[in-house]
C-alpha cells in the first residue's frame, strides 16, 4: 500500500515548529470528493500502525490529524498516544450531544483537541471547556469577523487560536496582533523584507566551493587546499563524516582522505547543506527543514527520471529554492551572489527546464495538490508508486541531516 501524505508545518509566535498537519489521500488520482474524510483518516491511522512510524514524518512533534464523527465514534484516536496527535475535528462534523460526549471522553484521556475551519455557532460554547485549539481560516474570513469570534470566546482563556492559510508576513503580523498563538501556511518561506544582505566571508568560501564542485570532474587538490586554509570548515567536515548521516567507512587522518571517503556526491550535498544552514541561522528551523526535504526529494525524482547526468544539480536547486526567503530579498538578487550554473538559475528564475518541473512537483506535493501532481508525474513519465516513497525518504533524510547539521553548523 502506498501512502500519499504531505505534511504542513504549524509554527508558534516565534516561528518555532509546534506541530505538523498531515494531509492524506489514497492515491494521486483519488482525491476528494472521491474519498471521504472517514476513509482518509482510517487509512492514515492504519498506515501509522502497520506501514510507517508517525515519528518518521513528524519527528518529535505532534501530528494534527482530521477526524470525522464516524472515526471518533470508532475510537480511532485512541490507537495513537495522546502526545503523538492533536485530534482535529473536521468542520463537517455537526455539534451535538453525541459529539460532546466523545470530546469529553478524549479530553479525560489526555488528548489535545482542535476544531478545524471553525464556523462560529453559539452551540459550540458547550464544547469550549474541552477544546484546546480553534483553527480559523485566514482566507475565508475578514479581520472583523475573526475579531468578533476571538472576542466572543475570550471568557475561555485556555483556548489557543491557530491561524491557517497564512501566506504573507502581513497576514502573520495581523494574526499576531489579533491574539493568535499558532500559525499555519507558508508565510515563513517568503522574504520578510526586500533588502540586501551581504554574505559573510565563510559563506563566500562555501559558495566558491559549491561552484568548484558543480562540474562533473571536481578538482580535489584545489578543494583540499580551501579546506586546509579554514580550520572551522575542516572541523565541520570531520564532524560530518563521523555523524549518523554518513556511514564512515575508515579512520580519517587527513583532510584529503576525509574528502575522498565522503565522495563527490556526498561532498556536494554537505556543502549545499552547510551553506544553507549558515545563511539561514537566524531563520525558523522549519525553513531549513523544508529546504532539505525539497533538495532530497528533487534529487530522488531526478534519479528516478534518469534524464540528468548529475542528479546533485537537482539537489542544489531544491536546496536553493528558498534562498530568497533565507536572505530576505528577491530570488534574482539572491542568486546574483552565487556562482551557479545557468541550468539552476533558469529553473529558479525563469521556471525553465526539467529542474523547474522537479521543483514544481515538489511544491505540489507540499500543498497536497494531488490532481496537478498526478498530471505532472504523467508528463514526466515517473512511476507514480515511487513518488510517495521518495517524499517519505526525503522527510526522514532531512530529519537526520538536521541532527547532523546541529552539530556542525
Image (tube, rainbow, N blue to C red):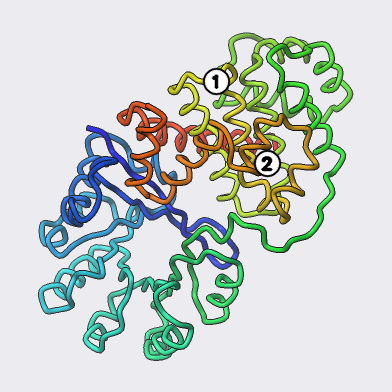
384 is higher (above) or lower (below) than 226: below
Q: Which mark is residue 277?
A: 2
The residue that label 1 is drawn on is 308
Alpha-carbon neighbours of circle 1 within 10 Å: few (<14), some, or many (≥20)?
some
Left or right placement of residue 102 versus residue 326 in this view? left
Who's the residue at 30% across and 29% down the image?
A: 385
| Label 1: which secondary element | loop
Left or right placement of residue 137 versus residue 268 in this view? left
Left or right placement of residue 230 versus residue 112 in this view? right
Task: Give the position of the C terminus as an image quadrant.
Answer: top right
Alpha-carbon neighbours of circle 2 within 10 Å: few (<14), some, or many (≥20)?
many
Report, in whole angstroms, how far the alpha carbon at label 1 lies from the one at label 2. Answer: 26 Å
225 is higher (above) or lower (below) than 383: above
Left or right placement of residue 199 versus residue 320 in this view? right
Task: Give the position of the N terminus as an image quadrant.
Answer: top left
Who's the residue at 71% across and 14% down the image?
A: 258
Q: Residue 281 appears at what percent x and percent y?
A: 70, 48
Q: Residue 197 appears at what percent x and percent y?
A: 81, 53
Q: Nearer the viewer, residue 346 or 56?
A: 346
Q: Residue 96 appears at what percent x and percent y?
A: 13, 79
Q: Nearer the viewer, residue 222 or 334?
A: 334
Who's the residue at 14% across and 57% down the image?
A: 75
Q: Residue 82 appears at what percent x and percent y?
A: 30, 56
| Label 2: which secondary element | helix
Q: Quadrant of residue 172?
A: bottom right
Amino acid at each position: 500500500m502506498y501512502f500519499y501524505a504531505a505534511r504542513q508545518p504549524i509554527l508558534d509566535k516565534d516561528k518555532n515548529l509546534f506541530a505538523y498537519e498531515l494531509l492524506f489521500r489514497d492515491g494521486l488520482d483519488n482525491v476528494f470528493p472521491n474519498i471521504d474524510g472517514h476513509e482518509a483518516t482510517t487509512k492514515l491511522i492504519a498506515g501509522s500502525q502497520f506501514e510507517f512510524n508517525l515519528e518518521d514524518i513528524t519527528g518529535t512533534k505532534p501530528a494534527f490529524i482530521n477526524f470525522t464523527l464516524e472515526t471518533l465514534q470508532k475510537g480511532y484516536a485512541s490507537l495513537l498516544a495522546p502526545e503523538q496527535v492533536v485530534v482535529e475535528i473536521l468542520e463537517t462534523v455537526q455539534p451535538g450531544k453525541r459529539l460532546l460526549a466523545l470530546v469529553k471522553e478524549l479530553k479525560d484521556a489526555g488528548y489535545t483537541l482542535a476544531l478545524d475551519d471553525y464556523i462560529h455557532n453559539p452551540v459550540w460554547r458547550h464544547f469550549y471547556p474541552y477544546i484546546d485549539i480553534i483553527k480559523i481560516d485566514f482566507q475565508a474570513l475578514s479581520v472583523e469577523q475573526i475579531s468578533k469570534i476571538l472576542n466572543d470566546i475570550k471568557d475561555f482563556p485556555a483556548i489557543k487560536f491557530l491561524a491557517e492559510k497564512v501566506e504573507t508576513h502581513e497576514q502573520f503580523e495581523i494574526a499576531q496582533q489579533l491574539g493568535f498563538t499558532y500559525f499555519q501556511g507558508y508565510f515563513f518561506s517568503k522574504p520578510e523584507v526586500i533588502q540586501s544582505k551581504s554574505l559573510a566571508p565563510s559563506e563566500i568560501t562555501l559558495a566558491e566551493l559549491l561552484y568548484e564542485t558543480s562540474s562533473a570532474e571536481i578538482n580535489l587538490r584545489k578543494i583540499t587546499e580551501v579546506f586546509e586554509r579554514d580550520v572551522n570548515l575542516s572541523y565541520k567536515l570531520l564532524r560530518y563524516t563521523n555523524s549518523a548521516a554518513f556511514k564512515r567507512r575508515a579512520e580519517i587522518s587527513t583532510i584529503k582522505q576525509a574528502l575522498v571517503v565522503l565522495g563527490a556526491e556526498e561532498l556536494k550535498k554537505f556543502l549545499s547543506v552547510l551553506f544553507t544552514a549558515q545563511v539561514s541561522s537566524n531563520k525558523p528551523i522549519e525553513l531549513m527543514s523544508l529546504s532539505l526535504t525539497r533538495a532530497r526529494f528533487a534529487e530522488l525524482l531526478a534519479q528516478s527520471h534518469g534524464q540528468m547526468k548529475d542528479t546533485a544539480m537537482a539537489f542544489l536547486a531544491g536546496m536553493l529554492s528558498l534562498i530568497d526567503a533565507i536572505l530576505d530579498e528577491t530570488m534574482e538578487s539572491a542568486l546574483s551572489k552565487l556562482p551557479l550554473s545557468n541550468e539552476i538559475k533558469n529553473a529558479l528564475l525563469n521556471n525553465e527546464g526539467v529542474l523547474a518541473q522537479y521543483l514544481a512537483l515538489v511544491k505540489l506535493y507540499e500543498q497536497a495538490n494531488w490532481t496537478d501532481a498526478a498530471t505532472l508525474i504523467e508528463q514526466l513519465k515517473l512511476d507514480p508508486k515511487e513518488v510517495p516513497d521518495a517524499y517519505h525518504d526525503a522527510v526522514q533524510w532531512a530529519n537526520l541531516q538536521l541532527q547532523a547539521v546541529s552539530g556542525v553548523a
